[in-house]
Amino acid sequence: MTTESLPVPASSDAGSAVRLLVISAGVSEPSSSRLLADRAAQKTVDLLADAGVAASVGVIELGPLAVDIAQGIVSGFPNERVQAAIDRLAAADAVIASTPVYKAGISGLFKSFADLLDNDLLIATPVILAATAGTARHAMVADEQLRPLFAFLRALPVPTSLFAAPEDWGSSELGRRIERAATELALLLRNGIGRSIAESAWSGYQHQFSGNATRAERSAADVDFDTDLMRLAAGGGIRTMGG
Amino acid sequence: MQFGIFTVGDIAPDPTTGYTQSEAERISNIVRVAERADEVGLDVFAIGEHHNPPFVPSSPTTLLAHIAALTKQITLSTSITLITTNDPVKIAEDYAMLQHVAKGRLDLMVGRGNTVPVYPWFGRDIRQGVALALENYNLLHRLWREDVVDWEGMFRTPLQGFTSTPRPLDDVPPFVWHGSIRTPEIAEQAAFYGNGYFANHILAPNFHFKPLVEFYRDRFEHYGHGTRDQAIVGLGGQSFIARRSQDALKTFRPYFENYPVFRGSSLDDYLARTPLTVGSPQEVIDKVLTFQEGFGDYQRQLFALDGLALPVELALEQVELLGTEVVPVLRKEMAARRAPGVPDAPTHATLVAAKYGDAEPRQPRPNPNRGDNLSGTSPYQDSAPEFQARFPSAA
């Protein structure tokens, strides 16, 4: 398969490197979840570099934020450390999300962090989904649990999810799957399809005023006043309202 | 600039003693707190409507009418009145009556309420909450300004030839604030009518509400009510005051750490990240001055300080410290920093003066009962002839 003919996305024209962000919920040191994500990130960077696209990789380790994330859940708002992680996520061009499997499911830490995100934070953001487990019996967790979660967030998970059980670390098959997922992610980034979706269809999604998403409405200049509710707010009638 | 307190009338076990106030005790304690607020010269006492335990204020107008009879100068208000699950007709009637018996010492804050089951209990759907709030206020606004209302909407049975009684005191409706913490449509409605906008300014990071306040200011100017700096903004806030900072922290910490909303949260995070202030009068003063700096000159500052299971003696002491040590300094400091031309929040007196100047206010006198308990097609002796009721004759 050749990828050389694809156009370079607009963000590269502007001179800014594509920002990949790894989110890892692995807690051991070294963590296999982090290792899997790092390999996918490195492969994506290499493929982008081959195509002349500069990319940078950032990492958010959720383990050190565990108490902060839990407090964000109960207080209803993230503290400064979690907010900094959310800001980095909002600014990412692509995400590599990696979690260990506990009790036949994704890490509660990962899910708790996701629970703190605005619903529109990752709209059409390309994502590689990755999970690691102690046994191959959990092989579907990435597709059965991470994929619906990112579907809810209306992100753009690549077709190939990554999963690694202990034996996979001795198999060249894992390397090939990583390359496939990285190729998919690199192509999405180079085509700029996620960016195009967000730019053209943004108003069709539900948003939170002054939220964390990079495109969130923050002032009167951003707000669409041509809606049923805004007309009602300005004393208008309700005849046209659905429901 | 107005300063006052707002409460939701919550009850919780005192973590230092295990004692839980009865509803009877809490209600009479709320009255004591309001009376003390009046005595120490605070400007506003506001109570928030709730319809489930452990909150007592299901009937704010009854409670506020009683407080009105016991107080001299304080303005009574709500934090908030549920504009979604109450019938706007009943709000119009109840608050107009309260405005009369309080001799004009009344305004109110309308809001949606976020307790999910309350909506179905009152036959409403929370998913329609914003539309309910907007439509109901549109009707309330007319009921207080038009002698005879014909109206049809999505949520309430239509009205033909309806007159809300009593007409507002001096035919000047109570000033309305719209409370909202996330919804630009609510801020838009406040701006459209030239009403006040209030951000509860608790349980969220510092300046979290600034974009909504700025949005309201821009739209207030857009609708021609004045410049954006003249928009009528209110903020909440939460504080616990003691003469010495370390005493405030020591006394307050168990109440914070055991209160359901805060369980598992870190007080230090809250102090660093949110408008909550626990400390000396000077620390509270310094914090509130940052509000003025961040949000611009505003008109009303309310403090939440009687909740979280505080025993009434502590709550009364809080009111005392706020009224005698914090607010007098803030009045001076904030006035000194205030830009010229920024108005005060409207009161009944200023609204009457704005409407009538030196003339006598209108005092509606009903036409007589024509025999079917209705006063005919024109409800008042001076009702404008073009606004006549059209309803079926009982004859």
Image (cartoon, coloured by chain):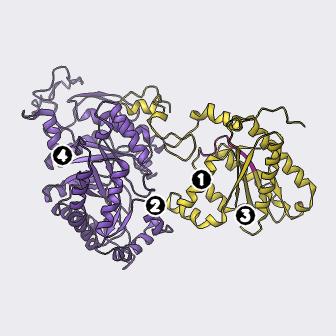
Chain ID, purple in image:
B
Q: Amino acid at mark 1?
A: Ile
| Disc number placed over residue A86 in the picture, else none | 1
Does label 4 or label 2 sit earlier along the sequence? 4
Residue B209 percent coordinates (x, y): 42, 49
Region in magenta = A121-128
| Dot 2: chain letter | B
Q: Most extreme residue toward the top, as rendered?
A: B386
| Dot 4: chain letter | B
Residue B313 percent coordinates (x, y): 25, 73
- In the figure, is residue A101 to the left or right of A240? right
List the residue tagged with mark 4: B99
List the residue tagged with mark 2: B273
Q: Most extreme residue toward the front, as rendered?
A: A15
Q: Amino acid at mark 2?
A: Arg
The quadrant in which residue B284 appears is bottom left
Circles 3, 1 touching at the beta carbon (< 8 Å): no
Q: Nearer the viewer, mark 4 or mark 1?
A: 1
Q: Are marks 4 and 2 on the same chain?
A: yes
Q: Nearer the viewer, mark 4 or mark 2?
A: 2
